[in-house]
Amino acid sequence: MAAKESRKRSRSTLQFEDNEEKLSLLRARIAESKKLLGECNNYSWIPKLIDFYDSHREKKSDAGRPDTSGTIDVKLPVIAPPSPSSGHEPSKVEIHTALEDDDGKYFIACKATIRSLVKGLTGSKGCCSVCGGFLLLDSFQMERRGHCGRISFTCENNHETVWFSSPILKSKYVANLRVIHGFMSSGLTETQYRGFTEAASLGSVEHTYLDSVFNKLGYLSAVQSVYEDGIKSVIEDIQKEQAYVDNDGDIIITDARHDSSRNAQHTTVTAMSYYTNKIILTINWSKQESSTAASREVPMTKLLIDKIEEMGMENDIDLL
């Protein structure tokens, strides 16, 4: 019986400085490079890395810019090294960003757009989706669009990649529309909204933008329709109350509130049902309707009661 032929093996050893922290960081970077190069073991990793280097040099030569430096300037993210005591390759890579003076650089992004960004970059293996060239991190630029961001960067062949932090609906960023809806629904004035967002460095939208959303996109008419449907539903619920039937009406509680701005620019009068504790109707006046806050309360309350009567609760109201 012929003896089994043994496979010949060769071994190479890489020696590094005896520094546990540096070795841990190096292991993490090697693990990350293996992921970028595709599935590979320690044996196939170095040849793949060399092939990757050679292909990069060929691309630069084809583009008419031969590589004279002999090196590749690739900036890797800051990777948190694994615990030195573990002795194993990390199962998780954490990317951290150092705190910098970035006032005015914040913007709003949503989960779907971040997923699209990651999908786009991983799909092209971190390279330009047009030519396959390296993306240049130094070309990174951000433009603020209200509360959103427009991010752009180029590759070594000057192809531009652009990412938007928010989906777009009828030429408007959805994140901007949600912020507008949020501050309007919470009762903030436009001045209060700007004060908050500018203090938080989250940007703001201009008055012309608000006007376009309110009128051209039909926001105000949509809110008015929902508001009227809500009032109708509340009144129907009140009229079904046994106490309302027994007493031939409801007890309406009204209250006037003035905003905190100088000379009270706005006054709001609200009517609430005594039986259901639900808000029936609210009206708001500004200095355009009445110059002083004190002179607004009585006519606003009378107008409020008239409107409630018009909606089906006539002659059944006791005013406190």
Image: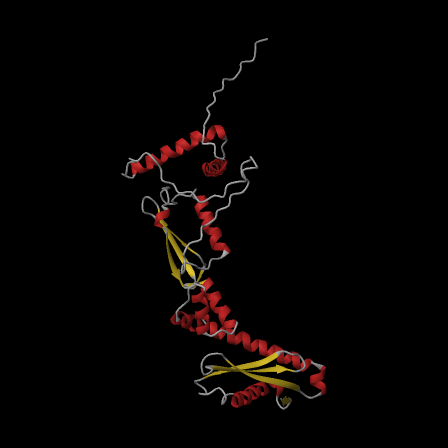
Residue displayed at 51% across by 76% down = 224
Q: Is residue 193 above or below residue 320?
A: above
Q: Nearer the viewer, residue 74 or 110?
A: 74
Q: Nearer the viewer, residue 276 or 77?
A: 77
Split into 4 quadrants, where in the image is the N terminus?
Answer: top right
Split into 4 quadrants, where in the image is the C terminus?
Answer: bottom right
Q: Locate residue 13, reporting x and y percent.
A: 46, 25
Q: Is residue 216 above or below residue 111?
A: below
Residue found at the far left of this picture: 64
What's the coloring here?
secondary structure
Residue found at the far front of this picture: 18
Q: Quadrant of residue 242?
A: bottom right
Q: Locate residue 250, reporting x and y percent.
A: 66, 85
Q: Is residue 264 above or below residue 222?
A: below
Q: Is residue 245 above or below residue 138?
A: below
Q: Locate residue 229, reporting x and y percent.
A: 57, 76
Q: Nearer the viewer, residue 147 or 112?
A: 147
Q: Nearer the viewer, residue 253 or 197?
A: 197
* Numbered circles on residues, count: 0
Residue displayed at 49% across by 65% down = 178
Q: Locate residue 164, reporting x and y percent.
A: 42, 56
Left or right: 227 in relation to 103: right
Q: Quadrant of residue 144?
A: bottom left
Residue found at the far top of this picture: 1
Residue displayed at 70% across by 81% down = 241
